[in-house]
Amino acid sequence: MIILVAYDITRSDKRDRVAKILQSMGLSRLQRSLYAGRGGIALARDIARVLEKIVDKATDVVDIVVLPENNWYNRIVVGSGRRRVPGNAPIQNTAVV
Protein backbone atom coordinates (compact mmCIF):
# COMPACT_ATOMS: atom_id res chain seq x y z
CA MET A 1 0.00 0.00 0.00
CA ILE A 2 1.01 3.60 -0.60
CA ILE A 3 0.16 6.46 1.75
CA LEU A 4 -0.22 9.94 0.27
CA VAL A 5 -0.31 12.94 2.59
CA ALA A 6 -1.20 16.37 1.25
CA TYR A 7 -1.59 19.42 3.42
CA ASP A 8 -2.43 23.10 3.42
CA ILE A 9 -1.10 24.58 6.64
CA THR A 10 -1.11 28.34 7.20
CA ARG A 11 1.81 28.76 9.63
CA SER A 12 5.30 28.04 8.32
CA ASP A 13 6.57 26.75 11.69
CA LYS A 14 3.81 24.15 11.72
CA ARG A 15 4.47 23.26 8.06
CA ASP A 16 8.14 22.68 8.87
CA ARG A 17 7.24 20.54 11.87
CA VAL A 18 4.77 18.44 9.84
CA ALA A 19 7.38 17.94 7.10
CA LYS A 20 9.94 16.66 9.61
CA ILE A 21 7.40 14.35 11.22
CA LEU A 22 6.32 12.86 7.89
CA GLN A 23 9.93 12.25 6.90
CA SER A 24 10.67 10.68 10.29
CA MET A 25 7.71 8.33 9.72
CA GLY A 26 9.20 7.08 6.47
CA LEU A 27 7.48 9.28 3.90
CA SER A 28 9.31 11.04 1.07
CA ARG A 29 8.60 14.54 -0.16
CA LEU A 30 7.16 14.59 -3.68
CA GLN A 31 6.24 18.28 -3.73
CA ARG A 32 6.25 21.05 -1.13
CA SER A 33 3.14 19.80 0.63
CA LEU A 34 2.81 16.29 -0.78
CA TYR A 35 4.44 13.23 0.76
CA ALA A 36 4.22 9.53 -0.06
CA GLY A 37 5.50 6.33 1.44
CA ARG A 38 4.86 2.66 1.79
CA GLY A 39 2.51 1.67 4.59
CA GLY A 40 -1.02 0.72 5.39
CA ILE A 41 -4.02 1.96 7.28
CA ALA A 42 -2.27 1.55 10.65
CA LEU A 43 0.53 3.94 9.67
CA ALA A 44 -2.01 6.33 8.13
CA ARG A 45 -3.91 6.41 11.43
CA ASP A 46 -0.66 6.96 13.36
CA ILE A 47 0.15 9.90 11.08
CA ALA A 48 -3.34 11.34 11.61
CA ARG A 49 -3.03 11.03 15.41
CA VAL A 50 0.29 12.85 15.43
CA LEU A 51 -0.74 15.60 13.02
CA GLU A 52 -4.08 16.35 14.65
CA LYS A 53 -2.12 17.61 17.67
CA ILE A 54 -0.27 20.12 15.47
CA VAL A 55 -2.67 21.47 12.85
CA ASP A 56 -5.22 24.18 13.50
CA LYS A 57 -8.52 22.51 12.58
CA ALA A 58 -10.08 25.90 11.83
CA THR A 59 -7.54 26.99 9.21
CA ASP A 60 -5.47 23.95 8.17
CA VAL A 61 -6.28 20.74 6.33
CA VAL A 62 -4.42 17.44 5.95
CA ASP A 63 -5.57 14.73 3.55
CA ILE A 64 -4.26 11.20 4.07
CA VAL A 65 -5.00 8.67 1.35
CA VAL A 66 -4.14 4.97 1.40
CA LEU A 67 -4.15 3.29 -2.00
CA PRO A 68 -3.08 -0.02 -3.46
CA GLU A 69 0.46 0.03 -4.78
CA ASN A 70 -0.66 -0.86 -8.32
CA ASN A 71 -2.51 2.50 -8.43
CA TRP A 72 0.83 4.23 -7.86
CA TYR A 73 2.27 2.53 -10.93
CA ASN A 74 -0.76 3.54 -13.02
CA ARG A 75 -0.35 7.26 -12.37
CA ILE A 76 0.63 9.69 -15.10
CA VAL A 77 3.66 11.86 -14.42
CA VAL A 78 4.23 15.13 -16.25
CA GLY A 79 7.95 15.93 -16.08
CA SER A 80 10.71 13.92 -14.48
CA GLY A 81 11.79 15.90 -11.41
CA ARG A 82 11.01 13.18 -8.87
CA ARG A 83 10.40 9.84 -10.52
CA ARG A 84 10.70 7.53 -7.54
CA VAL A 85 8.43 5.20 -5.67
CA PRO A 86 7.97 6.04 -2.01
CA GLY A 87 10.59 4.19 -0.05
CA ASN A 88 13.31 5.14 -2.58
CA ALA A 89 12.81 2.19 -4.96
CA PRO A 90 13.06 3.10 -8.66
CA ILE A 91 9.81 3.58 -10.50
CA GLN A 92 8.73 1.05 -13.09
CA ASN A 93 5.88 1.09 -15.61
CA THR A 94 4.95 4.75 -15.09
CA ALA A 95 3.64 6.77 -17.99
CA VAL A 96 5.64 9.99 -18.33
CA VAL A 97 4.18 12.80 -20.40
Image (spheres, grey):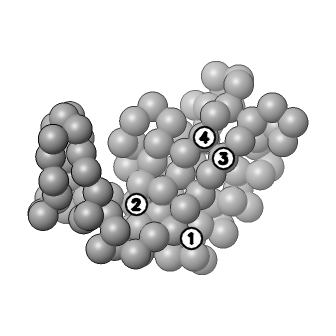
The residue pinned by badge 1 equals 43
Where 25 sits versus 35, above or below? below
Mark on residue 22?
Answer: none
Q: Are marks 4 and 1 in contact (CB under 8 Å)?
A: no
> Which percent across, then down, holds residue 61?
71, 42
Residue drawn at (66%, 69%), measured in percent from left and top? 45
Q: Earlier in the sequence, mark 1 or mark 3?
A: 1
Q: Alpha carbon of mark 4 to alpha carbon of mark 1: how far?
A: 17 Å
Of circles 2 and 4, which is in front?
4
Mark 3–mark 4 CB contact (< 8 Å): yes
In percent of width and height, residue 67 lies at 45, 70
Quadrant of the image occupied by residue 79 = top left
Reading the image, the residue beneath label 2 is: 37
Residue nearer the viewer, 25 or 7: 7
Name the N-terminal-most of marks 4 and 1: 4
Q: Amino acid at mark 2?
A: Gly
> Alpha-carbon neighbours of circle 2 within 10 Å: few (<14), some, or many (≥20)?
many
Q: Quadrant of the N terminus?
A: bottom left
- Asked whether disc 2 touches disc 1, contact meaning CB atoms under 8 Å apart, the reply is yes
Of the numbered discs in the image, which one, if any, rests on residue 7? Answer: 4
**Which secondary structure lies at badge 1?**
helix
> Identity of the amino acid at label 3?
Val
* CB within 8 Å, label 1 to label 3: no
Distance (Cα) linking label 2 and label 4 = 15 Å
Q: Which residue is mark 3?
A: 62
Which residue is painted at 65% across and 67% down in the image? 46
Judge the density around disc 4: few (<14), some (14-19), many (≥20) Cα neighbours within 10 Å: some
| Residue beneath the point at 38% across and 49% down | 28
